[in-house]
Amino acid sequence: MPVDAAETFARIEAETREWVDGAAARARAYEDWIARTEAEASARSRRLTGAHEAIRELVEHRPWSIHPNLLAEARGLARLDRLDGRQERAAEIVDRSNDTVARAEARIREIDPEDPLLARAADPTVRQLALDAVRSITELDADRASKRNGIGWSQTTSVVGHVLSRKPELSVDETVAAVRILGMHRGQVREDHRAVLFG
């Protein structure tokens, strides 16, 4: 059977193009992997390099976001002159703290669009009173809800309360979240504010 040279050439050309395209795709995938690996290594290096400063900042300005079981360890790391091999541990505590705050922020945003409190929270006076109230309770939360003494936040409201208290002002959604947790601590809200906040 005679060989069709043009057909053979076309087949070889197609196979060669397929191989070249595949090689190029593999090369791009390898380059992407190298770039990701280098970026991850760089990020990890920056994370560990800044771990000492980060744990000190955390202990000084945001201790309420550290899990109670880790607070003593975090304070000990922050007091060290050098971490000497404990950078990873310090970074882990900082990361956990950041995750805790992120979860609280997400919880604050979980508002039912049909929530009847939305109409009340649209009032600027209510928003300001809610912010004043969460700040007031936060100031009393020195024990971070480690004791059942009816003062400050509870274990379920502590982080959200602290996050809200740090806001310069509350949005409507944040006010709904604030009123919800304030309702769980109604006895610590000024009596003349309760009717405005709770209706």
Image (tube, rainbow, N blue to C red):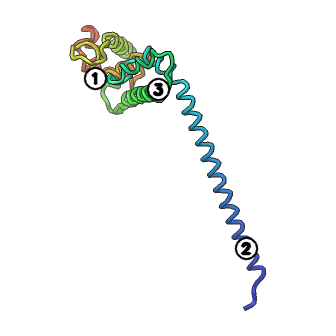
Q: Quadrant of the N terminus?
A: bottom right
Q: Nearer the viewer, residue 74 or 142?
A: 74
Q: Quadrant of residue 153?
A: top left
Q: Nearer the viewer, residue 63 or 157?
A: 63
Q: Which residue is the site of mark 1?
A: 155
Q: Residues within 10 Å of mark 1 (few under 14, many from 20)?
A: few
Q: CA distance from mark 2 to mark 1?
A: 71 Å
Residue under the image location 36 percent in, 30 percent down: 107
User: SS for tag 3?
Assistant: loop
Q: Is residue 44 above or below residue 29?
A: above
The residue carrying pointer 2 sits among few (fewer than 14), some (14 to 19) or many (20 or more) residues within 10 Å by Cα, namely: few
Is residue 199 something one can see in this rendering? Answer: no
Position in image of residue 98 (x %, y %): 44, 27
Residue 52 visible in the picture? yes
Q: Which numbered tag is attached to residue 12? A: 2
Label 2 element class:
helix
Closer to viewer: mark 3 or mark 2: 3
Kindly identify which residue carries mark 3: 86
Residue type, numbered disc 1: Gln
